[in-house]
Amino acid sequence: MFTSRIPFAWLGYAFYNNGDTYGAYDQKTDGNPPYIFQGDPMQHQPGHGIGDFAANNGQVITDKNAGKTQVDVIDNSFVMPKVLRGSLAVDFKDKNGFKYTLEAIYTKTIKDVMFQQINLTDRPTYAVFDSAVNHQYQPVFPGQNNLNPQFANAYEMSNTSKGYRYSITGQVARAFQSGFGFSLAYTYGQSKDVANGIRNSFESNWQLNQALNPNDPQLAYSNFDIRHRIVGNINYRKAWNKTWVSSFSLFVSAQSGSPFTYGFVNYTPQNTPQQVSLAYIPAKEETINFFAPTETQTAAEQAAAFDAFIDGNKYLRSRRGSFTERNAGRTPWNASADFHFAQDLHLNTTADDPSKVKTITLSLDI
């Protein structure tokens, strides 16, 4: 069992955004209502910063109880992240000197971090997107809770027990008396969690966690999901004599691309302060219902182009009549190769004391 720590900045936010000594001002940028903004830094007066901007736009800045503010809180039962990990490995060497290794690692989440916006009214309605057989529903929240008008966003950090990851690795290796050696390994793994916990604040961890219901995120692939990885190494060492020794090595690595999410940025159909959301992929016969004619294209032409894009993507076409999932997309495979050559020149090789032998090494890395 292993326990880790969280970024201590998260704990600091609970003291910083305490609802009493910090004020926040939120303003939509669509100009409704219009807001006053002086963007010329040459006209900035010392001591007149964001407070003046808020005051010029109708906010009372001399009374801390006059307007809404954000608060970050920590669940009283919160504990540091904890996992249970087990591994099993088997090595076998045959009569020809080949070594085979099989290793499996499994990690189960005991306590992980979870972020919620607890000032949302937890009474969503559900919008039906199309007439697909399973009738996919989008939760739409009625807005912020009005029990306490002093708070805008209220974020809570708590724990969850959801999550796991595992990997299975197979390897074969052999070292030959001639100086040649090699190893080749393949790893398959999966990692799932409800919150990646890679952001610097409660707010950003919640806002950038792609989920239909951001306060009840479901298990999805982690940002650190491995999936496939292949690693190969070839090396050769040649001692020409006591003075000159050459060595070569080639390391090659190839792995699945990074996971990413198909969805929307700065658009949240669920009417929450989220900055990202999942996308609904309509059934093919329903696509045209999501488009309106423009000056250059009809709705049918737009739907046909959209369908061609969806059908050209293996994952997206599998989500017809359903929502995308967090981190279910993949960038192309990543591959890298490193070549190393080293030429050793040993000096004073006739000395009886090995510690007196000096070596000069010239190396080349590509």
Image (tube, rainbow, N blue to C red):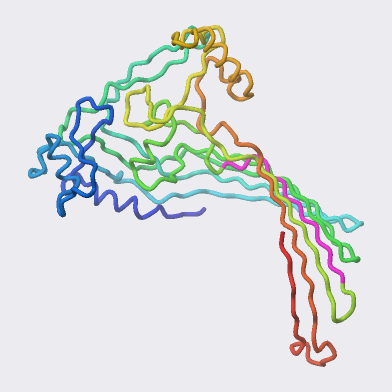
Q: Nearer the viewer, residue 71 or 3?
A: 71
Residue 116 appears in view: yes
Q: Determine if the magenta segment contains residue 236.
A: yes
Q: In this view, does 115 lie to the left or right of 1?
A: left
Residue pictured at 17% horizontal, 29% vertical:
147
Q: Position of residue 210 (x, y in %)?
A: 44, 32
Q: Position of residue 123 (x, y in %)?
A: 29, 21
Residue pictured at 80% horizontal, 64% vertical:
248
Q: Where is residue 352 in the image (x, y as percent from the top left)?
A: 82, 92
Q: Compared to 288, does 332 lie above or below?
A: below
Q: Is residue 296 left or right of residue 20?
A: right
Which residues are the magenta region? Answer: 225-238
Residue pictured at 31% horizontal, 40% vertical:
156
Q: In this view, does 8 lie to the left or right of 182?
A: left
Q: Which of 295 and 256 is in front in this view?
A: 295
Instruction: Name, please, the residue furthest toward the front.
Output: 42
Residue 168 appears in view: no
Q: Which of 168 and 289 is in front in this view?
A: 289
Give the position of the C terminus as an image quadrant.
Answer: bottom right
Q: Where is residue 346 in the image (x, y as percent from the top left)?
A: 80, 82
Instruction: Name, please, the residue furthest toward the bottom.
Output: 352
